[in-house]
């Protein structure tokens, strides 16, 4: 049994205006996973695993980019492109050889990243926090685009989870920004529900 409608219905109960430490994103993630069937839980685990830098190997990306799930494929394709742009930026800044630590999946095919110039412009911002926020805002926007036409589907649930991960990260880095992102996420879910009901 699919529980997508219920899962997305519980999301707005998150009070994004609460103080740091009062938003238990881990408990919410556990609750969401608990409602998924085994196949969807595997997709959930793949997505969440991608937020752990230690798991981001070549094999991980190859598996993610061949996933039967459109959201997983598109999300990790974008994630790989952004991470590679960050690595190239650091290589230039540190004077390292150009291709050092760049993740290459296919030696015979060069990846084309349409937003390369946009991401490079974010990386050139002088302030580290501003750069990180810019990259997360970019990913948030891409996630919204990936799930724009999705309503009660696994892609919609995964899109929510991905944005929840971003908001939770910022709650640790900068509580005010984290709460702002939680409010934005909850408002988006509520607005989607209203448009469906109408």
Image: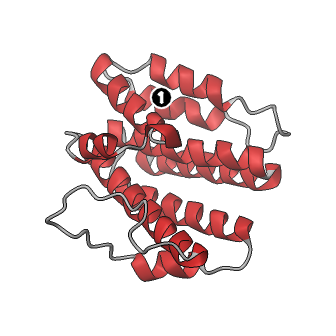
Q: Residue at x 81, y 33 (%)?
A: 21
Nearer the observer, 112 or 163: 112
Q: Position of residue 123 (x, y in %)?
A: 58, 75
Q: Residues within 10 Å of mark 1 (few under 14, many from 20)?
A: some
Position of residue 161 in the picture relative to residue 158 (left or right): right
Residue located farthest toward the right when viewing the structure as drawn: 19
Q: Residue at x 13, y 65 (%)?
A: 108
Q: Position of residue 115 (x, y in %)?
A: 39, 76
Quarter of the figure with residue 57: top left
Q: Residue at x 42, y 56 (%)?
A: 79
Q: Position of residue 61 (x, y in %)?
A: 31, 46
Nearer the observer, 91 or 152: 91
Q: Residue at x 63, y 23 (%)?
A: 27
Q: Is residue 1 visible?
A: no
Q: Is residue 134 visible?
A: yes
Vertical position of residue 23 compared to residue 17: above or below: above
Q: Position of residue 151 (x, y in %)?
A: 36, 44
Position of residue 32 in the picture relative to residue 108 (left or right): right
Q: Quadrant of the N terminus?
A: top left
Vertical position of residue 118 compared to residue 158: above or below: below
Residue located farthest toward the left when viewing the structure as drawn: 108
């Amino acid at each position: 049994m699919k529980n997508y409608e219920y899962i997305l219905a519980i999301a707005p109960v998150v009070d994004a205006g609460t103080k740091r430490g009062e938003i238990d994103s881990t408990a919410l993630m556990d609750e969401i996973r608990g409602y998924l069937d085994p196949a969807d839980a595997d997709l959930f685990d793949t997505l969440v695993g991608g937020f752990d830098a230690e798991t981001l190997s070549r094999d991980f990306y190859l598996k993610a980019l061949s996933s039967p799930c459109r959201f997983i494929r598109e999300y990790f394709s974008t994630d790989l492109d952004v991470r590679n742009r960050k690595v190239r930026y650091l290589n230039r800044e540190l004077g390292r050889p150009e291709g050092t630590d760049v993740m290459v999946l296919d030696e015979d095919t060069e990846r084309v990243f349409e937003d390369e110039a946009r991401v490079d412009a974010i990386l050139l911002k002088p302030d580290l926090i501003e750069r990180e926020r810019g990259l997360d805002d970019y990913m948030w926007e891409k996630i919204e685009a990936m799930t724009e036409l999705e309503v009660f589907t696994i892609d919609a649930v995964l899109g929510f989870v991905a944005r929840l991960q971003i908001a939770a990260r910022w709650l640790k880095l900068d509580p005010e920004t984290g709460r702002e992102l939680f409010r934005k996420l909850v408002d988006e879910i509520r607005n989607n529900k209203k448009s469906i009901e109408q």
